[in-house]
Image (cartoon, grey):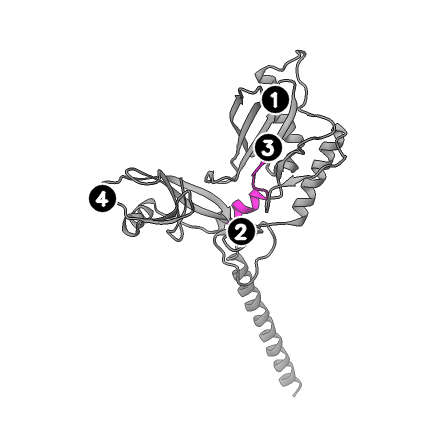
Amino acid sequence: MSRLRHAVKTKSALCVAITVFVFTVTYTGCAALQPPSASGPRAANDPLYPIRLTEDAHRKDATLAALHRLLQVSGSTNGIEPQLQPVTGTILSLPAKPSDALYLPKLGNGVVMTEEETRESLRRFIREWQELIGSDPAKLSLVERTDQPDGLKRANYEQRPFRYPIRGKYGKLQITFTADRRLVDLTSTCVPDADQLQTALSALNLRPKAEDAVQKLRDNGLDYSNAQGNKISWTVPPTSEITARGLTTYILPAENRADVLELHLTWEIELSNAPVKIAYIDAVSGKVVATE
């Protein structure tokens, strides 16, 4: 009888162990299918694609804290109304009339910095105040440095944190200043938490083909909105040349969520004899995401 009881207990323990093992494997397998989110766990009804960036109060607070530090450096802390970008929480613009001027770091011994000194000064400013900008400085590239007719100077940067380049209005930084280093304005549409977003994009494990996107465009035509917001359907004529330039990461606000940005993997397609020059076609759904 004791042997029988022992056998029953052993069998019962084995069943429990197998159940726990199966549950663990199943749960782990399901978790592996979920791309990591830049803003915490997804809701049960949230789709895995497009990748989403959700507004985050902590991110906004960090930007405000950095802006407060910047203004303290200049003594401009009275009557300040900070302006931040929606969702990303990055700087939208500097206060219009700070009580004291803000300046870029001074380099060199001359009254006016050389172009090389100016660029290094900008790099140091970006490193110091990257919380305002929302990007790792190493992922920012200077694409244009211009002197305006009104005497203002501008430096335009592009954020390049993803495998495929960002398209749309996001991923950009502009710094406006004067010859004496006075900071006039600072605006950033850079995308924070870029490393997590890239991990999520990579986890999709897609193998989209350019020829599939081109063929869908020829078969289905082009549905887009013009500058007046009117929806237009255009049939692609046989004479129109269609060239897929490459994959891009197109970022735009979600249609029904003011607190969410969506990252779409898109083909950047150039068209000839067409009402638009460039169309961005979702590499997953085949839908037109945007046109230029």
Q: Does residue 267 appear left or right of residue 179 in this picture?
A: left
Within 10 angstroms of label 4, few (less than 14), some, or many (20 or more) residues?
Answer: few
Q: CA distance from mark 2 to mark 1?
A: 34 Å
Q: Which residue in the structure is indicated by mark 2? A: 52
Which sits in the foreground, 266 or 3? 266
Q: Is residue 227 magenta?
A: no
Q: Of marks 2 and 4, which one's residue comes earlier in the chain? A: 2
Tag on residue 137? Answer: 3
Within 10 angstroms of label 1, few (less than 14), some, or many (20 or more) residues?
Answer: some
- Give SS at disc 2: strand
* Residue type, mark 4 in image: Pro
Q: Nearer the viewer, mark 3 or mark 4?
A: 4
- Give SS at disc 1: helix
Which sits in the foreground, 250 or 99? 99
Q: Which residue in the structure is indicated by mark 1? A: 120
- Give SS at disc 4: loop
> Where is residue 32 shown, x and y percent of the image?
52, 57
Q: CA distance from mark 1 to mark 4?
A: 51 Å
Q: Which residue in the structure is indicated by mark 4? A: 238
Q: CA distance from mark 2 to mark 3?
A: 23 Å
Q: From which residue to which does the magenta span run? A: 188-200
Most extreme residue toward the top is: 110
Which sits in the foreground, 139 or 7? 139
Q: Of marks 2 and 1, which one's residue comes earlier in the chain? A: 2
